[in-house]
Amino acid sequence: EVQLVQSGAEVKKPGESLKISCKGSGYSFTEYWIGWVRQMPGKGLEWMGIIYPGDSDTRYSPSFRGQVTISADESITTAYLQWSSLKASDTAVYHCARLAGDSLIYDGFNIWGQGTMVTVSS
Amino acid sequence: QSVLTQPPSASGTPGQRVTISCSGSSSNIGGNSVNWYQQVPGTAPKLLIYRDNERPSGVPDRFSGSKSGISASLAISGLQSEDEADYYCGAWDDSLGGLFGGGTKVTVL
């Protein structure tokens, strides 16, 4: 079964760092793009960025470039989203998702993780 | 305010047909594919339509997608109570990267 399993919920203080994970299984991890999507409480989906684990090609939304870092470790088939200094406004559910094919222009996200709730509060 | 514009809400009675629009520009919908997602609150989104009008296996044929110019639409025919959810369009933008619409909440009356 193709699946993405995300790390558990996190509660952090402003200014702290954080790295959450998304482990892929059941498919060739290096051959599919994995993206990250933010969903703030009661709000819609926001596309953050995407990585191709095969060569680490990474694209960021202008809204998130410089705010987060996306990476992947193909040896353990895991993608990551990290912050160096969290803000209260980073409180949200973060979804990882895999593209259905190899085209950023044509393919949608057909496999989704269960989401990771990140709460940032003093 | 999202680059891809959707109406915030839509509704219908069981059995009716509901249509959701998604408006963009030549740098996204006009030149690239549109995908549609369904999200029941508290769960992960689900791909409903890809490449403008293709359905993944397992998605009922009550759901259909279309595109014309810089606008796309998702139609739900024979609306059912389990269709009550949030629906998002998505597309790649040549300058901005990936985009989602603001989402449309569908209510079954």
Image (cartoon, grey):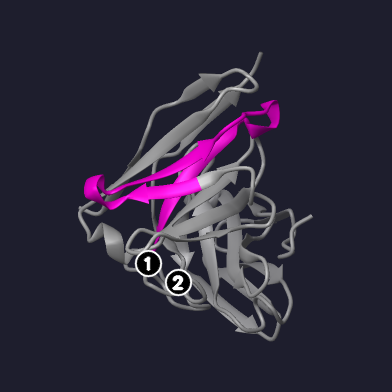
Q: Residue at x 54, y 27 (%)?
A: A17
Q: Is residue B80 visible?
A: no
Residue B39 picture location, percent across and down: 52, 49
The residue identified by callout 2 is A107
- A118 vs A25, left or right, is right
Q: Residue at x 53, y 78 (%)?
A: B52
- Above or below, comparing residue A52 to residue B65 in the picture: above
The residue identified by callout 1 is A100
Q: Residue furthest top?
A: A122
The disc, 1 or 2, on the residue closer to the chain's N-terminal end is: 1
Write down the chain letter for disc 1. A
Q: Which residues are magenta?
A: A70-99
- Above or below, comparing residue B84 to residue B60 in the picture: above
Q: Is residue A86 magenta?
A: yes
Type of amino acid under label 1: Ala
- Above or below, comparing residue B56 to residue A75 in the picture: below
Residue B11 picture location, percent across and down: 67, 55
- Above or below, comparing residue A18 to residue B86 in the picture: above
Look at the numbered disc 1 and give the secondary structure of its residue: loop
Q: Residue at x 50, y 29 (%)?
A: A18
Look at the numbered disc 2 and give the secondary structure of its residue: loop
Residue B43 picture location, percent across and down: 46, 41
Residue A22 picture location, percent across and down: 37, 43
